[in-house]
Amino acid sequence: MLELFTKFSEKKPCEERVFLDSFVYSLALYFTFSTRNIVQLTIFLNGLILLESMSQPTSPHRIAATLQAGGKSHQYFDLKALDANNGGKVAKLPFSIRILLENAIRNFDDLATNNSHIETILNWQPKPPEEEIPYMPARVLMQDFTGVPAVVDIASIRAEYARKGGNPDDVNPLIPVDLVIDHSVMVDFYGTPDALNQNVEVEYERNMERYQFLKWAQKGFRNFSVVPPGMGICHQVNLEYLAHGVIARAGADGVSYAFPDTLVGTDSHTPMVNGIGVIGWGVGGIEAEAALLGQPSFFLIPEVIGLRLTGKPPLGTTATDLVLTITRLLRDYGVVNKFVEVFGPGLDNLSVTDRATISNMSPEFGCTVTYFPIDTRTLEYLTKSGRSAEQVDLVEKYAKANLLWRENEDQIVYTHVLELDMSTVEPTVAGPKRPQDKVLMRNLKSTVASTMDKTFSRTYTELADRKEGGTNGSVR
């Protein structure tokens, strides 16, 4: 039985083993392994192996090329050549759609991902048809609330597999998984220089059994790592440390394949990493488990709303002011279940931290992602945040070679384009009730007075009319 699994797991590069092998692998792990089921599964596996040996799937859209970057040689699937073969279609696609196109081409197996899916993405229209496409992330980001149950599931599968005579070391996530412990952290101490250390110490005492289990999982599973408490929130860690921009990963044949960094995360604010050109969004625990078992997720091919930024934020305004202004613009238009892609000359005036702040508000916008394409600002951030020179070189050369570098934006066709002159942004306050609500600073006084009257039936009192010693000096 294990020999059958091995035939599948060794047949293809790791990023191409999307459906056939991983489907069979996960199916086998969930089997009850009764005698009859083992016989049926063995027949099923041998039949698939016979079919695959008779005909290896091919796609006319898979055009391989070689890239020299970071002192190494990498294979990649060439979107520029595909563009030349299809009358310039790829260059007209939004950058985010190009990444989905590369993802489908790379993971093509003629089963879960077939030529019809690739052609649906290649022929993307501003008002796309209601057709589903596959998405196979390169990695999974988890936080501890949803991550721990997923690890328990994998450990349970491993235990059952061992009880039935299998090698438990064969049961591992098929793609890298990073679990960041941040959601369960509580604040017991504050206002002192050693408050952080005290909180972390109490955190370990409070959750020792759970952390011991995660430590065991990190040592026992391949493709699984844990970021301990006290290191920051998962999106910050993802942005500053875990995200690569472009991934280079060796396949089973020993060849290094370069491809865009993509992910799913078990938190709604996963799109924060869109600020450095990485496609990713939040999913539930079940979808995340399916991804780590090598299963693609399917969703309707999205509309893409272009957000064209011009000008420069005025002195004295903050990223929060800009974000709240963009939130109002996007919510008024309606971007639920859509992609938003930011472009225009104004991007030259936005740091990556400002971009990430905007992308982080994707759940408040209502969109799936808020994507910023890779450019010189991205490279500057990767360098400043400690990525190696070789990694930065790979990101730059791959993006420029494969139509993912921010250029020729005027050729791109979007579903609709919204425009914002950032020089018109004013100091803004969020609220009064929801974080996505916007109140201009100059209107704050009247808004507070109105809110107190309508919501709390209280009257706002001018400062000069307030009496000292009252029970509530600002209202009556």
Image (spheres, rainbow, N blue to C red):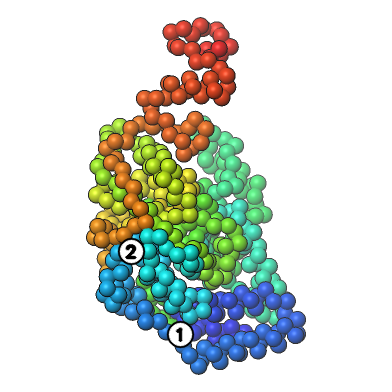
Q: Residues within 10 Å of mark 1 (few under 14, many from 20)?
A: few
Mark 1 residue type:
Pro
Question: In screen coordinates, is 441 left or right of 402?
Answer: right
Residue 45 in percent (x, y) is at 61, 86
* 413 up-or-down from 229: above or below: below
The answer to which image quadrant residue 120 occupies is bottom left
The residue carrying mark 1 is 57
From this viewpoint, is residue 386 visible? no
From this viewpoint, is residue 346 visible? yes
Q: Nearer the viewer, residue 14 or 209?
A: 14
* 97 up-or-down from 449: above or below: below
Q: Of callouts 2 and 1, which one flags the residue occurring earlier in the amino acid sequence?
A: 1
The answer to which image quadrant residue 255 occupies is bottom left
Residue lying at 49% horizontally and 35% vertically, measured from the top left: 193
Mark 2 residue type:
Leu
Residue lying at 42% horizontally and 63% vertically, measured from the top left: 128
**Helix or strand or loop: what does disc 2 sit on?**
loop
Q: Nearer the viewer, residue 294 or 219?
A: 294
Residue 212 in percent (x, y) is at 63, 57
Residue lying at 72% horizontally and 80% vertically, measured from the top left: 33
**Helix or strand or loop: what does disc 1 sit on?**
loop
The residue carrying mark 2 is 93
Residue 380 in percent (x, y) is at 28, 53
Question: In screen coordinates, is 378 left or right of 12?
Answer: left
| Foreground disc of the pair 2, 1 | 2
Residue 192 in percent (x, y) is at 51, 32
